[in-house]
Image: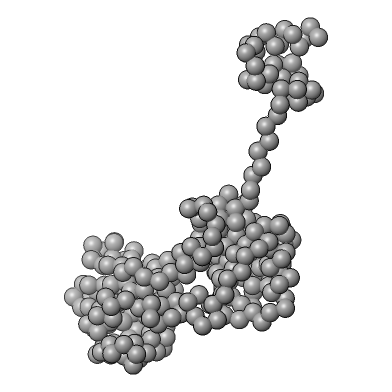
Amino acid sequence: MLTFIPTPIGNPQDITIRAMKLFEEAELFLCEDTRETKKLLRLLEERFDMVYPDADFVSFNEHNGHERLEEYGKILESKNVVYVSDAGMPIISDPGQILVEYCQENGLKYDVLPGASAVTTAYAASGFSEGKFLFYAFLPHKGKERAIALAEAMKNGFNTVLYESPHRLEKLLEEVVAADENRELFLAKELSKKYQRYYRGSAKELSEQLKNETIRGEWVVVISAKKCVEKSLSFSEVLALDLPPKPKAKLLSMLSDKSVKEWYQELINT
């Protein structure tokens, strides 16, 4: 059976007992990066007395995923197979999605364990009150595609979560400032790690603040939804509008006890 196992996004103590037991029993590891997985397993062995598994380790990523399925697809049901990404929840914005599709198409059993996620951790820490948000993962690195994706993220009407690398964070802030310098942002640096830090403020404020700091590590950015200000017109304001009699009569009727027909007659006789 194939099991997708989340790994810590920083602090190794965030691993679960269930995850370690399944690691010990695994016969095959499909890994986004075998080196990262082996490093984690050695750490768990040293710190938490986990038994290092007697298993094979195979890379599985967006470049070789389909090729790997041709090699190992037939044993996914007969052996204890686990898939892990480099950090956090597998499958979401991750090559593990290829495996899920394969299992569904071929009627194979699989399981996904709950665990650490930078997306939900950052959004919970943001303090933004809305329960709804959209996740955009990494924006395209440059060009027209990046501009379009960022514009969509800022205008979709929802709080939006992005991932950003340290060498592009300053560029992202400059782009947001250019579009809307007052847009409120929340930034989470190095979640669950020693140098974790939170920042919240307008795009302009944070852009200026971070110019004086060393930007390192992985970042999660939450862009607040654009606030739509609704303005209600008073009766006198509607009456003063330069509109044709028919649409003005409809508006005045909505604000009074008179019918549209009565207002229309009054307007054309004025």
Q: Answer with left or right where residue 215 lies relative to residue 74.
A: right
Farthest left residue in view: 78
Colour mapping: one colour
User: In x, y percent, where is residue 42?
Assistant: 35, 91
Q: Is residue 198 visible?
A: yes
* Quarter of the figure that contains the C terminus: top right
User: In x, y percent, where is residue 253?
Assistant: 65, 16
Name the residue located 50 percent from the left edge and 75 percent from the top edge: 191
User: In x, y percent, where is residue 163?
Assistant: 55, 69
The answer to whether 49 is drawn above or below residue 117 in the figure is: below
Name the residue located 46 percent from the left edge and 64 percent from the top edge: 120
* Quarter of the figure that contains the N terminus: bottom left
Name the residue located 60 percent from the left edge and 56 percent from the top edge: 224
Which quarter of the figure has residue 70?
bottom left
The answer to whether 89 is drawn above or below residue 180 in the figure is: below
- Of residue 40 and residue 48, the one placed in the foreground of this image is 48
Which quarter of the figure has residue 4?
bottom left
Farthest bottom residue in view: 46
User: In x, y percent, where is residue 106?
Assistant: 25, 64
The answer to whether 26 is drawn above or below residue 226 in the figure is: below
Q: Tag count in the figure? A: 0
Name the residue located 18 percent from the left edge and 75 percent from the top edge: 78
Q: Is residue 99 visible?
A: no
